[in-house]
Amino acid sequence: MNICLVAHYAYRALTNESAGHIGGVERQIALMARWLAGRGHDVSVVVWDEAQATETMVDGIRILPVCRRSAGIPGLRFFTPRWTSLVRALRTADAELYYHNCAEYVTGQVALWARRNQRKFVYSIASDPECDPRLEILGSLRERVLFRKGLRIADAVVCQTSSQHRQLGSGFGISSVVLPMPCDAPAAAVDSRPAGPARTVLWVGRIDRVKRAELLLEAARECTGVHFRVVGPDGDDAGYVESIRSAARALPNVTLHGAVNFAEVWRHYREADALICTSRFEGFPNTFLEAWSQGLPVVSTVDPDGLLAKEQLGAVIASASDCGRVLSDFLADNEMRRHCSENAYRYFKVHHQKDAAMRRFEELFENVIRDIGPQNRDNTG
C-alpha cells in the first residue's frame, strides 16, 4: 500500500525530539508510520515546515513539508500558503489512501482533495467532543463546515470507544468502526512493583485549561505524604501556565519536569505508583495505554467506556471536588493498587500491544483501498 498520513505537528515525534508540540496524536502518527513502513508499505507524512524546507526521509518514512505555520498574511494564509502547500504535498505523496486524525479544517481539505482525485480518505476521532454535532471545540464556522464535510465524505471513520461510535451515529448519522489504539511500549517488569505504601503519583500532559492541572495541585495539598511529578510541555495560555507554575512552586511535594524526551517519560512511568488524569474530556488517552503497559493503574476524571471501573484498572474521580479524596483512598489501599496494576498490564497486553492493534488498522486500510467497507462493529473487546 501507499499511505499518506497528514499530521502537521508530527515532525518532532518522527525525529524523536522533545522540543515543539508533541501530543498523543503526534506519537500515534509516528508509531503508525514506522510500523507501516516496517511492513514494507510506502509511507509519507505531511507536516509543517520546521526548518526542513524540502522532502526528507526518516526511518524509511517520507516527510513532506507544507509551509511554515507562521507563513503568509493573517486572514489570507488560510488559502495561501496553507491550503495551496497542503495540496502540493498531497499531490507529491501520490498515495492510494490518506489518513487524518484530530478535528480541524484540514480534515475537510484532505477529504475534498482525495475525493476529487479518486483517492481514499480515512478519518480517526481523537477526542469525545469531535463526536458532538455542536463541535464547540472548533472556534470558527469555517472550521466546523470543513470538518463536517470531511467527516461525511470519508471512506471510513475510526473511533476509539463504543461511546464515540454511538455519538457519531446519533449526532451525525455516520457509521464508524471502533479500533483499539496501538502503543509502542518497552517491556515492563510488573512483578517488581513495590507492594508497600504509595510514594509517587505521575501526571502527564500539556499544562492547559482542558487538562486542569489545578486539580492535581489540589490533590497534592491533600496528599502531603505523596510526591507528584508533572511531565509535559506548557500550553499556549501563558497566564494559565504561570498560575500553575507559581502554585506548584509553593508545594514541596510537586516537581514540574517540563517536556522531556520519550525515553525519560518511560522512566517516570516505571517509578510511579499511579497515574492521575484531571482532564475535562479525552478520547482514549495515550497516557492510559502507556501507564497500563507498565502495570501502572490510573486515577482519572474521565473513564473511556467505563473501563477503569468495569475492568478494575484504577479509580474514577466522579467530580472535581473529589479529586484528592479519591486519590488518597486509592493510594491507601495497597492490595487494590496491586490488583489494578495486574489488571492494567493484562488489559494492555490483550488489546493495545502495537503489532496486534496495528494489524487491525492495516486490514482496515487494505479493505478501504479495495472498496470493502469497514464493518460497523465494536472491536474494543
Image (cartoon, rainbow, N blue to C red):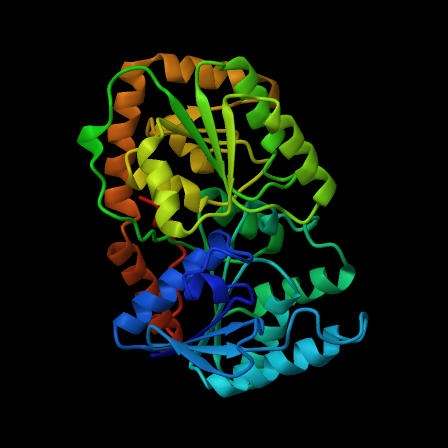
Residue 13 placement: quadrant? bottom left
Q: Residue 121: where, in percent of width, then height?
A: 49, 72
As drawn, 370 above or below 288 = below
Left or right of residue 199, residue 122 in this image:
right
Q: Where in the figure is residue 37, as x and y percent of width and height?
A: 31, 73
Q: Could one spot residue 124 in this view of the protein?
A: yes
Using the rendered image of the protein, determine whether residue 176 is visible from the camera's viewpoint: no
Q: Quadrant of the N terminus?
A: bottom left
Please state if 207 lies on the left or on the right of 317 as rendered. Answer: right
Asked if 7 appears above or below 88 in the picture, the reply is above
Q: In this rendering, is residue 41 above or below 157?
A: below
Q: Going 31% across and 21% down the picture, which residue do you hit? A: 337
Q: Quadrant of the C terminus?
A: top left
Place residue 214 in its image quadrant: top right
Instruction: Judge left or right: residue 270 versus residue 126.
Output: left
Q: Please give the name of the residue rendered at 31% of the width and 77% of the height, measured from the top-left corner.
A: 41
Q: Residue at x 53, y 86 (%)?
A: 91
